[in-house]
Amino acid sequence: MKKEMSQIALGTWAWGAGAAGGDQVFGNSTDIDTLRPVFDTAMLHGLNLWDTATAYGMGASEDILGTFAKTVRRDEIFLSTKFTPQIAQMYDNSVEKMADASLKRLGTDYIDVYWIHNPMDVERWTPGLIPLLKSGKIRQVGVSNHNIEEIKRANEILKAAGDYRISAVQNHFSLLYRSSEKGGVLDYCKENGIKFWAYMVLEQGALSGKYSKENPLPAESARGRKYNPVLDKLQALTDAMKEIGSRYGISCSQVGLAWALTKGTNPIIGATKERHVVEVAGAADIRLTAEEVTRLETLADATGVDTRGEWEHTME
């Protein structure tokens, strides 16, 4: 019998190197040897949901995760990966061919949750999921970076082909970027039994409380170029997160995670070190008060910082 899926997913965007990989985006240097303890520690803590994508290092992240996934029983782990329209030409513009390549790299015969990575063309790409569902190569379907109308249309396409539906939505959602809430996506998901997976909850480390103007993110990385210029504007917010954390005996990062859990989401937290996993496990059961949530969101709004990615469109 399949184990229960953990509410928190561990993200592997920073795993491996190459185009859109950990070295270029995060300024990290990771490999199988450094990441194996991360995987093993997570599984020991019951964190069995792993999120990746073909686009992360152009398969490098999937390769590493697949190497580790083979060391546990398939019913103990949940694998989530994505079809990315922007690189579809590398797979003859075929959703199935990209999925098949992911299956091979992950070393499995099915994917638990398979996503359309962005709404580049809902009408064109969504139907490509249907043969994969019928064959059992994918168990559930998700859409990422979609607004309400795009989610509804994807659902219509799936339902027209049989008893299929969107099971999950994965959008950028953090204290600094709540467009999915303001645009009604969170409420829509709750009303329709759709799980909302929140990515970039800690804004690639900018909300971890570890970085400041004096101690910036790696300057040569994409995240350094994006967040270093605004770290001073985040100080009041991260100070408040640390203060709230002291009441619970948790870190600034864990407060950010607890906020996302309190909002009813399934947070995706990037993990490249064992301590990241231990932090995630330590915050899994913590929920903030309504007053704490309001205080943090008010301070976040006051920063005036917009962290929407270049790949995203607004949900409002």
Image (cartoon, rainbow, N blue to C red):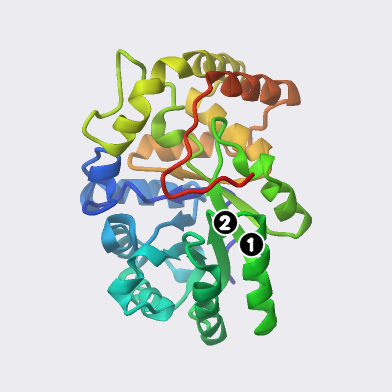
Identity of the residue furthest to the right in this view: 191
State the residue position of label 1. Answer: 151
Look at 58% across and 39% down and name the residue there: 284
- Quadrant of the rendered image containing residue 25: top left
Relative to 251, residue 113 above or below: below
Query: x%, y% of residue 250?
Result: 53, 24
- Quadrant of the rendered image containing residue 147: bottom right
Lateral position of residue 96 relative to residue 239, left or right:
left
Regarding mark 2 in the picture, which secondary structure is present there?
loop
Relative to 297, residue 117 above or below: below
Q: Quadrant of the C terminus?
A: top right
Query: x%, y% of residue 297?
Result: 63, 25
Residue 147 visible somewhere in the drawing: yes
Residues at circles 1 and 2 in contact by the CB criterion of under 8 Å: yes
Q: Residues within 10 Å of mark 1 (few under 14, many from 20)?
A: many
Lateral position of residue 82 relative to residue 92, left or right:
right
State the residue position of label 2. Answer: 146
